[in-house]
Amino acid sequence: MKRSTWLILLIVTVLFAGAAVWSVTERNARLAARDYGTPLFPGLDGANVNRIAELRLDTGHEAWTLKREASGRWVMVERAGYPVDPDRVKQAVVALANATILAPRTADPAQHHRLNLDPPAAVDSEDDVTSIALSARGADGAVMADLLIGKVKALPTSRDPGQAYVRRAGEDRTWLVEGRFDIRKDPTAWLDKTLFRIPREEISAITVHHPDGEVLRLVRNRFGTLNIADLPDDRASRDVRLTATQRALEFLPFADVKPAAEVDMSDATVTTLYADDGTAVTVRSAPAGFQVDKDPGYWVTFSIEHDPELATTPDDLPIPGPNDEGKQREVDVDAGAARATEAQARTDGWAYLFAEFTAQNFRHTLETLSEPKEES
């Protein structure tokens, strides 16, 4: 081939390539100018957003459905209708309604993977999840919004809503949008984790009944801490563990939940914690047979009752501590009754999954709460 012919072909090729790039750039510029600042889902304006009655999510690892009941409460279908966090649902709905287009991105399906916008594929671990499918439906089942959420370009902050790459269902075009798409990829993160709380200083006694017949009794002393009843003379209590046990109902971070009827509690350890206001919390716990957060897991049920006759009298309360400013703590029996009623209504019929770190406080033995005395 002559040198002049080769140069002509090269120039023509460069011109065609440049024209193609210019065409794509020009088309994207027109799209950006046309769509910048427009809602991703224009139909979710005004009262329409309040018509959303169902959210469906799929990560490839798990899929779950959130539904709004007639009472307005949101529940998770895959957890037998257990309540979910209303604030998290509201955040997701508002994110859909407020999502605003910033710029168009690729419309080539072969390039979707670069933005994590391929449909969710089956994966073995939550850590392998790359995209989340999210759809919103009305009470009649009509789809009101449907999209894939891929890579996050900027996380939401207190001042800025954040940016993410998304693709609407049925479209090849992808978009960079502005919105608070803090969509958790673990269904248990959507559950309402509120149970109940009884502070350490209100726990006056604990009894633990083990399946093998061992019974452990803990009683509060005049200084407000627990002692092991009938502690053998050759053993010393482990005070740090006793304090943790007295705090057992201060923080109850469960990992999952299922109907109590689905859990075998025939060999459960039964622990009852008594509070000053007459509340008695009976906790049944049994090994789950698998790990939670790299620790053995346990299924736990709660039964909360209230009897004003069990309330601690002023004479039996601990002496005021350094934080009490010399004042004796008052016992509100009526408030205790209300708290017990609410806690029982919330937990009745459910079994909660806890890691051993939390569950161990309901399963202690004399062996775990004491140690042989050192010889002097």
Image (tube, rainbow, N blue to C red):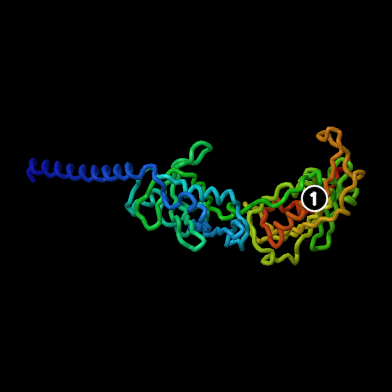
Element under disc 1? helix
Say how many tags the image has: 1
Image quadrant containing the C terminus: top right
**Mark 1 packing: few (<14 Cα in 10 Å), some, or many (20+)?**
many
Q: Residue at x 11, y 41 (%)?
A: 7
Quarter holding residue 258: bottom right
Give x and y (percent) for residue 185. 52, 52
Is 112 on the left or on the right of 275, as rendered?
left
Q: Amino acid at mark 1?
A: Gly
In the figure, is residue 78 to the left or right of 100? right
Residue 201 vs 268, above or below: the answer is: above
Residue 341 visible in the snapshot: yes
Q: Residue at x 51, y 36 (%)?
A: 159
Q: Is residue 124 visible?
A: no
The single residue placed furthest to the front in the displayed view is 47
Asked where in the image residue 164 lies, by quadrant, the reply is top left
Residue under label 1, please give it.
336
The percent coordinates of residue 103 (x first, y second) are 36, 43
Residue 236 falls in image quadrant: top right
Of 43 and 306, nearer the camera is 43
Q: Position of residue 208 (x, y in %)?
A: 81, 56
* Left or right: where 19 falls relative to 87: left
81 or 97: which is nearer to us?
Answer: 97
Of 299 and 178, which appears nearest the observer?
178
Residue 23, position in %: x, y?
Answer: 24, 45
